[in-house]
Image: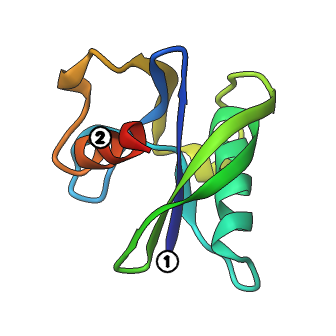
């Protein structure tokens, strides 16, 4: 199971650039695996903190499908920081605020979720 957060601020969305299982490099929403004993919400908050340095507040569940939970979130504290010493972050190349107008950064997975988040 996976939990991710879609965080939009100042016409940009928080993204992580990472290697994925198929070997490609893609921009994804921050998030990751739900550990035993964790709720999807707890996992989402922990994963975003680990991957981006931000403490977040979840505003609601946007979408759930095939054991993947996508939440709408907002920054509650911290600062943008990629912890390269964390072994769980080895697949991450960069974390950044991506302007919503840079459509080439989004793919067939992230674009529909982004559009759904914007509509909310």
Task: Identify the residue at the far bottom of this view.
Answer: 37
Q: Residues within 10 Å of mark 1 (few under 14, many from 20)?
A: few
User: Percent from the top left, x then y, of residue 61?
Assistant: 55, 62
Image coordinates for residue 29, horizontal then vertical, percent:
45, 43
Which percent across, then down, holds residue 48?
65, 46
Give the label on residue 32, or none: none
* Residue drawn at (76%, 85%) of the image: 37
* Residue at x 24%, y 51% (from the top left corner): 109
The residue drawn where x is 76% and y is 22% is 79
Q: How many numbered tags mark residues here?
A: 2
In the rendered image, the residue lying farthest to the front is 120
Q: Which residue is mark 2?
A: 115
Eye-nearest disc, 1 or 2: 2
| 35 displayed left or right of 28 | right
Q: Mark 1 touching mark 2, by CB under 8 A?
A: no
Alpha-carbon span between mark 1 and mark 2: 23 Å
x then y, percent, for residue 85: 71, 38
- The residue identified by callout 1 is 1
The colour scheme used to paint the residues is: rainbow
Instruction: Describe residue 25's horizontal placement relative to residue 31 as left or right.
Output: left
Q: In the image, what residue occupies the spot 21% across and 57% down?
A: 22
Q: Secondary structure at mark 1?
A: loop
Residue sitting nearer the eye, 22 or 37 = 37
Mark 2 nearby-residue class (10 Å; few <14, some 14–19, many ≥20): few
The numbered mark, 1 or 2, whose residue comes first in the sequence reads 1
Against 83, is 117 above or below?
A: below
Which quadrant, please, contains the C terminus? top left
Check the image and report above or below for 80 versus 60.
above
Find numbered disc 2 in the image and state the secondary structure of the residue it sits on: helix
Quarter where residue 52 is shown: top right
């Amino acid at each position: 199971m996976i939990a991710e957060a879609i965080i939009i601020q100042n016409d940009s969305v928080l993204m992580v650039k990472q290697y994925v299982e198929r070997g490609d490099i893609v921009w994804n929403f921050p998030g990751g695996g739900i550990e035993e004993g964790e709720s999807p919400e707890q996992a989402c908050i922990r994963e975003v903190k680990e991957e981006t340095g931000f403490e977040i507040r979840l505003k609601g569940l946007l979408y759930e499908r095939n054991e993947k939970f996508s939440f709408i979130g907002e920054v509650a504290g911290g600062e943008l920081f990629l912890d390269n010493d964390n072994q769980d972050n080895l697949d991450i190349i960069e974390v950044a605020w991506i302007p919503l107008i840079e459509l080439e950064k989004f793919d067939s997975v992230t674009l529909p979720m982004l559009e759904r988040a914007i509509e909310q």
